[in-house]
Amino acid sequence: MKRFRTLAGRMVTALGPGALLVCMLCPATSQAIEVHPTATQVQAALQRGKQAAEQRIPPDQLYAWFGEDGDLHPRGFLMTKLGGLAVMGTHFYLRGATPDEVEIAQILDGKTLLVGVILYGDRSTFAIDSYALFDQGGRTIKPVSVRFDGQAARSSVWPKSPAYRAKVVASFAYADFDPVARTTFSVFLSGGGQVTFDLDFSQIE
């Protein structure tokens, strides 16, 4: 797989009550953020999904992951159009089926980039009313929508800290941001505190 490199650096976020958010930025795998993929790129993404199915690689491993590997650390992912095609292809090929033109077109016609992050905290409701933003060179980009877990799952160290694990997912309109710019992705918790990832979209190869 090709490599998606984030900007190097270590970040410790400002924490609110019930939240523990520490992040080490590191490489992650990805395809490019192509707003208008070519036919060749589409076929390559579907082939990647087929190969993953043959190797029994879980579909979520085809997301463009960023953040520190390992449990109990904030980690995020991008779902690009090409990544979405690869993931869809894996699901189909695992069932012995093949995506048709309608399913492929639905992904290619998508208007938003999905960005998710897994966070850890000490309350089961710590992710409620979370918000997210992109910042590109001082320009703030607001998401079209933000979803979050209202009830976080228990972490692997429950009842010890951090006891809970939750996901926040934001969708950003392709028309609103530069798909090749250095970007700061921030998630803000309603109870205080935030986690920030520095990403360089231009480094997606």
Image (cartoon, rainbow, N blue to C red):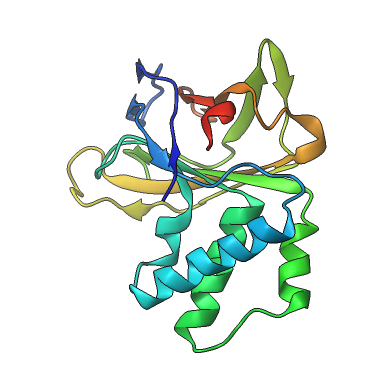
Q: What residue is rendered at 77% in x and 48% in y?
A: 36
Residue 84 to residue 171: above or below: below
Residue 94 to residue 182: above or below: below
Q: In front: 198, or 39?
A: 39
State which quadrant residue 6 falls in.
top left
Q: What residue is rendered at 20% in x and 49% in y?
A: 158
Residue extending farthest to the bottom is 96
Q: Position of residue 4 (x, y in %)?
A: 46, 37
Q: In front: 199, or 128?
A: 199
Viewer can see residue 125: no
Q: What residue is rendered at 59% in x and 23% in y?
A: 183
82 on left or right of 199: right
Residue 137 to residue 119: above or below: above
Q: Position of residue 89 (x, y in %)?
A: 56, 72
Q: Position of residue 126 (x, y in %)?
A: 44, 39
Q: Position of residue 155 (x, y in %)?
A: 27, 50
State which quadrant residue 134 falls in.
top right
Residue extending farthest to the top is 138
Q: How many numbered discs, if any?
A: 0
Viewer can see residue 153: yes
Residue 126 to residue 107: above or below: above
Q: In front: 2, or 25?
A: 2
